[in-house]
Image: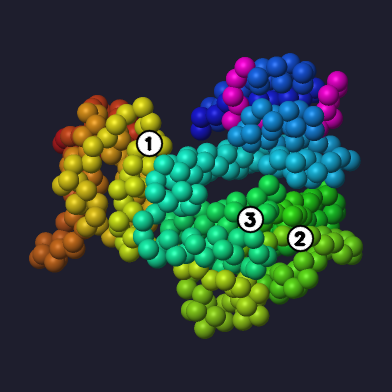
Amino acid sequence: MKANVLLVDDEQNILKMIELALNSFGFQTEVFSDPEAALKRAQEKYFDIAFIDLKMQPIDGLQVLAHLKRTSEDTTIVLMTAHGTIESAVEAIKKGAYDYLTKPFTYQEFTHIAERVYSHHHLMREVKGLRAQMQEEDFPNTIATKNFRMRDIIKTAKDIANSDIPVLIEGESGTGKELLARYIHENSDRAENPFMAINCAAIPENLFESELFGHTKGSFTGAIKDRIGRIEMADQGTVFLDEVAEIPKPMQVKLLRFLQSMEYERVGESITRKVNVRIISATNRSIDEELGKGELRDDFYYRLSGVRFKLPPLSQRKEDLPILAEYFFSKYSPENKYELLPETMKYLMDYDWPGNVREFENVIKRLIVFSKDGKVKPEYLPIEVINEKPKQFSNVIPKLEELEKQHIIEVLRLAPNPKEAAKILGISETTLWRKRKLYDL
């Protein structure tokens, strides 16, 4: 992780603990106990991320937030607040903060949110870069594609962006479901309000209701303080329910009530609360199959699918490969120019890309490593891309060890030195040395 981080808090013990955590990620951290000095430094240097205490003197965190949003709108800001000022923190989110962190918190709690904040910031930079590139193409203000099917999807998405109709997006992993969801949000009148992405598959069933709707202190084991749910934090904005087919059926019932009325209760209290959010959901499963198996309730599905999009896999939109390649080359190595040789492009076009755009992105990263002179040659491609067509099994099937040996030979041939080879293989130099000795390389 590479990021410049601004840390502002008037408590020295908090500063020290957070600084240690941020440095462990490799972040370049600048620490201030004086908010005015921090703002002066922010005028001199760009910061990717800022962690700001809410209660400070002579100016408070909300004033620091407002100043940073005016002068450095790309900075991702997290407010840190004591329990008694949670409502102020939620107000700060509506004014542009990404999230808030309630004091006191542990080292582990902080590192968890720091990872999430960095992932969010990195994604926002990707989206901004893609938008800039799109404006240079002949299809401004949209997602970069020349595929007619995708263009129709984008046009429809823009047409319904300003409505509150729920949207369900289907597609294989890596096809850009979240990118389309963000496109709808950013073209709506909710664009200035939060976009809250929730990975439903990553939340344990026993914590699902708490994560979405929040909880009160003592409502269950481990609930050591009040917590506002992700739904409430997204008020006036958009909630993106990713992998919605993974939601347990009992929670589908609870969500159904919310979808019908936009009303909910935090776990452990009986106060009915109401929000105004747009719901966009996505899944990489077949909705029809999930309905047929009974894993997805019919009434829940009907509430989610006001408009239903099905994104085509990359294998069905190969005309987008050149523009995607240009985008990823520019993203990961903007200072260099790359020439995709015709024979290399032929291999890319012939491959079916089962991992879709995400797999294609990783291949471009590999090509950047090997293409020292800017010429992207076929021999730099992974074995699976070159050998796309499956061969008939011979009488002698190669053993796993032989396949590993051949792969190591190829990487050693292309890498400039063993250290770089070990990095590409994802193993330590010591492990590589042992395998070379084992295979007599």
Badge number at residue 276: 2
Residue type at tag 1:
Ser
Secondary structure of the residue carrying numbered label 3: loop
First in sequence: mark 2 vs mark 3: 3
The earlier-in-sequence mark between 1 and 3 is: 3
Name the disc covering residue 330, or none: 1
Which residue sits at x=81%, y=56%?
A: 215
Looking at the rendered structure, the secondary structure element under dot 2 is loop
Q: Pinpoint residue 72: horizontal percent, then vertical percent.
A: 64, 29
Residue at the spot x=80%, y=33% of the render?
62
**Crowd class of label 2 (few under 14; some 14 to 19; many from 20; radius 10 Å):** some
In the image, is 361 to the left or to the right of 6?
Answer: left
Q: Is residue 55 magenta?
A: yes
Q: Is residue 395 above or below residue 123?
A: below
Q: CA separation, marks 2 and 3?
A: 14 Å
Circles 1 and 3: CB atoms closer than 8 Å: no
Residue 190 is situated, as x and y percent measured from the top left of the image, at 68, 53
User: Which quadrant holds residue 245?
Assistant: bottom right
In-front residue for pair 71/253: 71
Q: Position of residue 344 (x, y in %)?
A: 19, 46
Q: Residue at x 31, y 51 (%)?
A: 321
Amino acid type at circle 2 is Asn
Magenta segment range? 44-60
Whether the magenta-drawn stretch holds residue 351 is answered as no
Q: Position of residue 106 (x, y in %)?
A: 72, 36
Of discs 1 and 3, which sits in the foreground?
3
Name the front one of labels 2 and 3. 3
From the viewer's perspective, tell me whether residue 29 is left or right of residue 178.
right
Q: Are marks 2 and 3 in contact (CB under 8 Å)?
A: no
Give residue 188's mark: 3
Crowding at mark 1 (Cα within 10 Å: few <14, some 14-19, many 20+): some
Quadrant of the image occupied by residue 207 = bottom right
